[in-house]
Amino acid sequence: MVVRPLLTVVRAGRLSYTAGLQLQQQLAKQKTVDFAEFRNFLLLLEHDPVYTIGIRTKGYTEEDEKRLRELGAEFHRTDRGGLITFHGPGQLVAYPILNLRQFKLSMRCYVATLEQTVIETCRQLGVLNASTTADTGIWVGDKKICAIGVHGSRYVTTHGIGLNCSTDLSWFEHIVPCGIEGKGVTSLSEQLQRQVSLSEASAALLESLAKKFNCQLQEQQQERVTN
């Protein structure tokens, strides 16, 4: 009988970007002799307003950083893939901390599976035309509904996705989201013309993720997390 990998779901609530990053790093730096002993986690959370930049900064200067901070958001440079994006209230952030060897996935296949998970989540909620394009992320027409930016080191993943549920989309007006000119952003609430909560989106995401990654899920509260 094939045993499916186990994934512990941590609902971390609302955190600053720094606190979320520290939690990721804590869970990713496990000392295990065998990859099968690695404990996989999925962090579900919401960030305070923050602009983040990936490893391809594409011209964002200290002046740009100052301008964005003056809007009331934090600003962080990160080691994830991708360009600039925004995280904030009303956006479901999911950080999978996985050892890909347990899932028998390459990094490329991991990203593709993550994309399919988000597409299936959107479809479950009623957004039927969410899809991938030549540009990163998940799109509805020419509007991005979910940003994807991941990092992998020694088969262990960090960072992940930001799915706009009821996000205030005006935050994106101050940047070129993910460095893509001439395209916009949207949210589940905008597409469905009703308020979509993080809890509703989380339930759909977990169902889709268990199916696409062929894994078992278990819940755990943040304060009980150990590795």
Image (cartoon, helix red, strand yellow):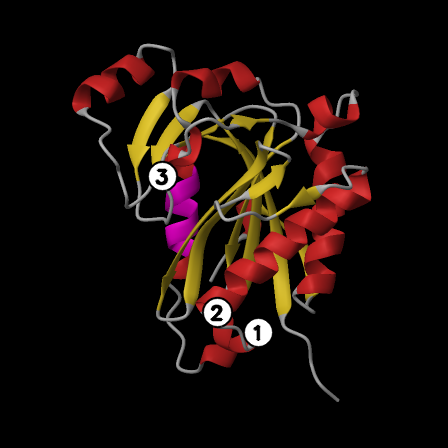
- State the residue position of label 2: 99
Q: In the rendered structure, which amino acid carries the disc numbered 2?
A: Asn
Left or right side of 193 for 130: left
Q: Point out residue 89 in the picture as x, y percentages from the top left corner.
A: 56, 23
Q: In the rendered structure, which amino acid carries the disc numbered 1?
A: Phe
Q: Residues within 10 Å of mark 1 (few under 14, many from 20)?
A: some
Q: Nearer the viewer, mark 1 or mark 3?
A: 3
138 is higher (above) or lower (below) than 60: below
Do the residues bearing badges 1 and 2 touch, measured as CB atoms within 8 Å?
A: yes
Which quarter shows the N terminus?
bottom right
Q: Nearer the viewer, mark 2 or mark 3?
A: 3
Quarter assignment of residue 141: top right
Q: Residues within 10 Å of mark 2 (few under 14, many from 20)?
A: many
In the rendering, which numbered label is found on residue 103?
1
Q: Residue at x 61, y 25 (%)?
A: 90
**How would you classify the magenta stretch by its main secondary structure?**
helix
Secondary structure state at the residue bearing disc 2: loop
The magenta span reads 20-26
Q: Point out residue 127 in the picture as x, y percentages from the top left corner.
A: 76, 37
In the rendering, which numbered label is found on residue 83?
3
